[in-house]
Amino acid sequence: MEITSESFATMHAFLEGRIPEQKMMIAGASEENRLFPKVLLPAHQCATSQDRKGGIADLTETIRNNRDWIQHQLTDHGALLFRGFPVRLAADFSSFVKAFGWEEQPYKGFAPRKKVEDCVHTANEAPLHEQIGFHHEMAWMDEWPSKLFFFCETAPPVGGETAIALSQGIAQRMEERMPEFVRRVKDTGLVLSKVMTPTQNTFAAFSAGKNFLETNDPNEAIERVVEVMGWTNFKCLEDGSVEFVLGPREAIRSFEGYGGRRVWFNTINGYGERNPSLSFGDGCHIPVEAAEEFKAIVDKECVNLRWQEGDVLLLDNLAVQHARRPSKPPRQILVAMFK
């Protein structure tokens, strides 16, 4: 990793670093170009102290003293990579994220996860050889986190990058290249419908009351799933499968405080006529060419972040999509979500 001469200027309590994966994102006329992600390094020796507990105490104090500046950088860049800080264990990561003073966002979604400590959970535990496509966390739900932290406890030997992409650029490119498709998406929204077999079904835990539903009554669990997850329809089939419908949802959104930026919030990556799970709000399938164009845009816009142990990645979930590349084990990434 290169540290530029510019980086040595003290920026509050951090130095700015460079990594090969970074991209300079070309902004519109009303905004400045910006690096994606922005890399923050320790500015003081005490932050990298071999006394881990002392280093964590110094680090959390630094965060508390610079929260407004960090929030400003996050809004400007969409993603901040903290590298070289004394974050080694789940307990360290928990102390790190709690220093921001943000309210935790309980997870509601499809991915199998385990609670590790306080507000810290494992990231999606799907098999490591599988790719996890680009998405905004909990975008299909009625509420979602605005901020995501990822912590690399164990870096994979091969692959396993977390890919990130600014959704503003994706929305702009789709509007330029497929205007008719975008107009139809805006008019009808998107609907996700799916049947998950028992072997696929992470919702088996939901219907048994073993997740956040706090009930062992299957009928009550179904009612709570529909209410809590914001699903249009949900039912358990006789063979143990689960059928559910989500939507319609807005694909392109603008959030308050972002200067009118439009972001592509509900992905169509991986969907199309060959994968009819996703459709327009009127029930018609997503054209294959639209899904393929979307994938091409995301692949060009994204940054594939190669993990180092101790890295903490902070994402603005209202601006940035993320994905997981396949890897060889071991790989352990922990996550914390905040409103």
Image (tube, rainbow, N blue to C red):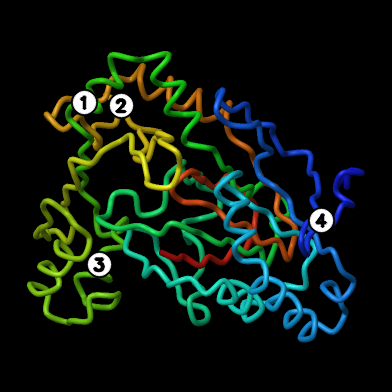
Using a 10 Å C-alpha cutoff, classify the residue at mark 3 as few (fewer than 14 neighbours), some (14 to 19) or many (20 or more). some
Q: Is residue 318 above or below residue 13?
A: above
Using a 10 Å C-alpha cutoff, classify the residue at mark 1 as few (fewer than 14 neighbours), some (14 to 19) or many (20 or more). some
Q: Of tags 2 and 4, which is closer to the observer? A: 4
Q: Earlier in the sequence, mark 3 or mark 4?
A: 4
Compared across the picture, whether 290 is left or right of 184 comes to right
Q: Which residue is disc 3 drawn over?
A: 204
Q: Which residue is disc 4 drawn over?
A: 15
Mark 3 belongs to which amino acid? Ala
Q: Earlier in the sequence, mark 2 or mark 4?
A: 4
Residue sitting nearer the eye, 290 or 73: 73
Mark 4 belongs to which amino acid? Leu
Q: Earlier in the sequence, mark 2 or mark 1?
A: 2
Q: Residue 66 location, x and y as percent?
A: 67, 66
Q: Which residue is disc 2 drawn over?
A: 272
Q: Earlier in the sequence, mark 1 or mark 3?
A: 3
Q: Which residue is disc 1 drawn over?
A: 285
Q: How far is disc 3 from disc 4 in space, using C-alphas?
A: 47 Å
Mark 2 belongs to which amino acid? Gly
Compared across the picture, whether 52 is left or right of 230 comes to right
Mark 1 belongs to which amino acid? His
Instruction: Say which element carries label 4.
Output: strand
Position of the C terminus by quadrant: bottom left
